[in-house]
């Protein structure tokens, strides 16, 4: 048995628990979607005074994507 094959077998037997378990990716999709909604929503509500008008179209598209992503993550966690 080669060293590479032996180490692969050793790694396959690792029983260390994964952070957030098997639901890691749905939690990350939910978190990133919610961050898109909150961040872009706040950018529309309170734009910087010296930066000019906020890009409303882009912010609304990102809010829409965030709603879809967070809904998808939440549905994956519930189901």
Image: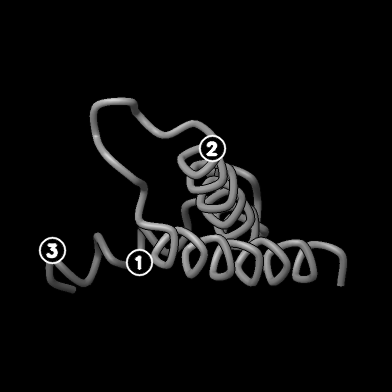
Classify 10 Å Cα crowding around label 3: few (below 14), some (14-19), many (20 and above). Answer: few
If you read the primary sequence from the N terminus, does the residue marked by circle 1 or circle 2 appear first?
1
Q: Position of residue 3 (x, y in %)?
A: 13, 63
Q: Secondary structure at mark 1?
A: helix
Comparing 32 with 6, the one in front is: 32
- Give the CA distance from mark 1 to mark 2: 49 Å
Comparing 3 with 70, the one in front is: 70
Q: Secondary structure at mark 3?
A: helix
- Give the CA distance from mark 3 to mark 2: 54 Å
Q: Is residue 7 left or right of residue 64?
A: left
Mark 1 lies on residue: 9
Residue at 54% across / 70% down in the picture? Answer: 65
Q: Is residue 52 left or right of residue 30?
A: left
Considering only vertical position in the picture, is 76 above or below 29? below
- Give the CA distance from mark 3 to mark 1: 10 Å
Mark 2 lies on residue: 42
Q: Position of residue 48 (x, y in %)?
A: 34, 28
Mark 3 lies on residue: 3
Q: Secondary structure at mark 2?
A: helix
If you read the primary sequence from the N terminus, does the residue marked by circle 3 or circle 2 appear first?
3
Residue at 67% across / 58% down in the picture? Answer: 23
Displayed quadrant of residue 8: bottom left
Which label sits in the foreground, 3 or 2?
2
């Amino acid at each position: 048995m080669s060293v590479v094959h032996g180490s692969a077998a050793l790694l396959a037997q690792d029983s260390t628990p994964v952070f957030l378990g098997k639901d890691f990716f749905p939690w990350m999709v939910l978190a990133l979607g919610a961050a898109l909604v909150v961040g872009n929503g706040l950018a529309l509500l309170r734009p910087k005074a010296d930066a000019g008008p906020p890009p409303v179209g882009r912010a609304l598209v990102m809010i829409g994507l965030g709603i879809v992503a967070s809904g998808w993550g939440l549905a994956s966690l519930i189901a």
